[in-house]
Amino acid sequence: MHHFQVRKGELFAEGVPLSKLADTYGTPLYVYSASTIADHFDRLSAALAPLDHLICYAVKANSNLAILNLLAKRGSGFDLVSGGEITRVLKAGGKAAKCNFAGVGKTRAEIEQALAAGVYAFNVESIAELDFINQIAGEKRKRAPISIRVNPNVKADTHAKITTGTYENKFGIAFEEIAGLYARAARLKNLKLVGVHMHIGSQITEAKPFVEAVKKMLPLVTDLKAKYKIEYFDIGGGLGIVYDPALASGTPQWWEKQKVKPLTPATYGEQIVPLLKPLGLRILVEPGRFMVGNAGVLVTEVLYVKKTGHKTFVIVDAAMNDLIRPAFYESYHEIVPLKAARNGKLVSTDLVGPICESGDVFAKDRPLPAQKAGQRLALLSAGAYGFTMASNYNTRPRVAEVLVEGTKHRIVRKRETVADLLRGETV
């Protein structure tokens, strides 16, 4: 579900035409829908209502302060993977006591920062890290709350670069080693065992892998609760979203011929809540993409149309440095004109950016309405891993970000300038 809709041939973000936002703030431009984010949070929370639960939004998906503040006001916790993300969450009004600090390479400075802030727990990813946190906590005369990340060796049907739950991945500790590691951790006087954690991957679009992983973990979690009185079971994130056309209400009407059923919060809850409720533990979940992916679009303007005899290239002002997912993951993003073409004729199009890389392509051989310079397009489902993975490649300033709430809109990150990029450099 999202709040980007076509009205009388024009694409709106909630109550605002995207063309108006492009006129006001320029392009390329990220636009986010506050109502979509709030709706997704509320739907997931409702699906988990039978459980004592805490939603810990994965900050890496989209770390804009305005979005973090929106979620903090709804009571969200946060999943963090860097010291910078700790700073962002606290600045946005989030509570450290609702934050889990994850990641395979925590530095001394980050561990000290998280201890000082009072995070809910460290998600420990290796034996070496366990010992290091114990050492630092001892130096600071604190007890560090920890959970250990279990690698359940469950394969999720997702992209190879975003699967995390098998022994081929760098994340977590092998399932068979966990019982012994908790026994070891219990002997370390500067640690407090508060939970157990797993995460099998991202962009998972069916319930089966979640169910399989939870079922495999249940005996272990039950044993850890009995022996160490752990407080929670963190089942990770990974709920996928719809990237392909006509997958939810609000998708532009000309794509409604295609029908795909997404994994909804209700379906997710129906499958996992009955398994988890008998545990009597708090359940943590870490959605990122699910919360913000379909809540954002990247607006871009056509610069040139280039026909080679074999191809029609539409060159736009956005590029792979603004949205790297198509180049990095071969991912699909629906492309929608801000104003519908009158004749409706579709042309097989390669939509490309201006960067000097052959991989700077948003879509190949995509049927799109015929374009001309000055027309604008929106790349849908760009709210997650869009701006947060953006770069300054080719000395391109990063784009502005705008948040829409009903008929109101405001800039939540100013467009960078070349002067911003050169600041700090010297000859």
Image (spheres, rainbow, N blue to C red):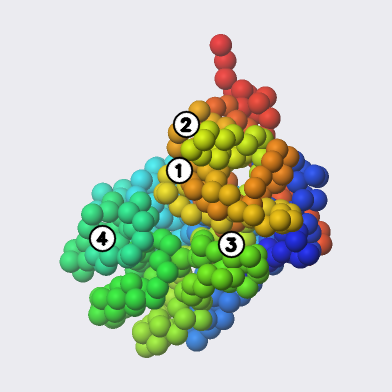
Which tag is nearer the camera, tag 4 or tag 1?
A: 1
Residue indicated by mark 4 = 166
Task: Relative to 288, say whether 25 is above or below.
Answer: above
How dense is the environment of label 3, judged by Cα within 10 Å: few (below 14), some, or many (20 and up)? Answer: many
Residue 421 image position (x, y, % from top left): 61, 27
Quote the CA–CA distance across marks 2 and 4: 33 Å
Q: Residue at x 22, y 61 (%)?
A: 174
* First-in-chain label (3 vs 4): 4
Residue 46 image position (x, y, % from top left): 56, 81
Q: Is residue 108 left or right of residue 387?
A: left
* First-in-chain label (2 vs 3): 3
Q: Which kind of residue does numbered mark 2 sit on? A: Glu
Q: Which kind of residue does numbered mark 3 sit on? A: Asn
Residue indicated by mark 2 = 357
Q: Which kind of residue does numbered mark 1 sit on? A: Ala
How dense is the environment of label 4, judged by Cα within 10 Å: few (below 14), some, or many (20 and up)? Answer: many
* First-in-chain label (4 vs 1): 4
* First-in-chain label (3 vs 1): 3
Residue indicated by mark 3 = 294
* First-in-chain label (2 vs 4): 4
